[in-house]
Amino acid sequence: MSGVKLTNVRKSFGPLDVIKDVSLEVPKGEFGVFVGPSGCGKSTLLRMIAGLEDTTGGKIEIGGRDVTAVEPAKRGVAMVFQSYALYPHLSVAENMAFSLRLSRAPKHEREEKVREAARILQLTDHLDKKPSALSGGQRQRVAIGRAIVREPEVFLFDEPLSNLDAELRVQMRLELTRLHRQIGATMIYVTHDQVEAMTLADDIYVLKGGHVMQSGRPLSLYDDPDNRFVAGFIGSPA
Ligand code: ADP
Ligand code: MG
């Protein structure tokens, strides 16, 4: 069963071909990591899956449903960004509930979803605080909480840890792995950091210049790279 499937997906910005014929499948419930150098098209690909960029060509399926022309809110995805842009004047609970404002669910159900997300993310004691009273790691958790309350089929993460210091990044990696085990949703995570890719991924997809160079289990890429780029990038010293 496929969580997210891309078939011959392309994207051009004017004369610039940013994504060149990408076909890949992230199985349902897996943690897939797109890794590659800056400018290779990772964010563009993720934004296309989210529906924030239209496709120049190809097909995008989520849970077996063709969503290529479906609006972002109806794709069953939630995206967590690098700059987590919380509303400074709203409390943690209000920030998390904000993404539910368009939902028709009654208030008590929305509050229950926020409480559940806070429990998963260990933010229960911070629900009434303003973002300015939180640490960087806690703020990033609130941003993840905003995605969790929407109960998406697919979580999309665009370098969510790159603003955090090294120690906190290690801790948040463990938390993301725990979150994935607990929620079991399909997750796609974009990063230029090889260590992050190796530690988080069920499957890694190595991108370069708008192409997938190789994909597979982290250790199989490490032990058996198809080419010099993958070898150099994933960092097997042999
Ligand atoms: P990555 O996330 O891997 O660093 P991006 O997907 O952000 O790469 O960008 C890939 C390429 O597409 C870059 O050359 C970037 O300048 C270009 N690009 C991204 N968005 C736009 C846009 N809206 N208009 C024109 N070029 C863009
Ligand atoms: Mg990017």
Image (cartoon, helix red, strand yellow):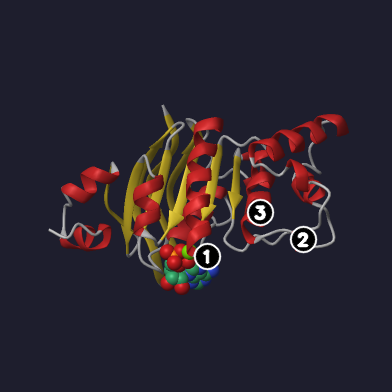
Which residue type does callout 3 highlight?
Answer: Gln
Quadrant, the N terminus = top left
Q: Residue lying furthest right in this view? A: 107
Query: Mark 3 highlights which residue?
Result: 138
Kindly indicate the quadrant of the structure image that contains residue 111: top right
Q: As displayed, is residue 136 above or below residue 101?
A: below
Q: Is residue 28 visible?
A: yes
Contact? badges 1 and 2 (CB < 8 Å)? no
Instruction: Find disc 1 in the rendering and name its residue.
Output: 165
Residue at mark 1 to residue at mark 2: CA–CA distance: 18 Å
At label 1, counting other C-alpha atoms closer than 10 Å, the crowd grade (few under 14, some 14-19, many 20 or more) is few
Q: Is residue 14 positioned above or below 212 on the image? A: below
Q: N-terminal of the two: label 3 or label 2?
A: 2
- Residue pointed to by mark 2: 133
Q: Position of residue 201 (x, y in %)?
A: 38, 44
Residue under the point 71% across and 33% down: 116
Earlier sequence position, callout 1 versus callout 3: 3
Q: Is residue 234 above or below residue 58?
A: below
Which dot marks residue 173?
Answer: none
Residue drawn at point x = 51 percent, y = 63 percent: 162
SS at mark 3 in the image: helix
Q: Are marks 1 and 3 in contact (CB under 8 Å)?
A: no
Report the amino acid beneath label 1: Asp
Q: Residues within 10 Å of mark 2 (few under 14, many from 20)?
A: few
Give the left or right position of residue 106, taking residue 59 as reference.
right
Judging from the image, what secondary structure is the residue with disc 2 in? Answer: helix
Q: Position of residue 205 (x, y in %)?
A: 33, 49
Name the one closer to the observer, 213 or 69.
213
Q: Residue at x 53, y 48 (%)?
A: 156
Three-letter code for the amino acid on which mark 2 is drawn: Ala
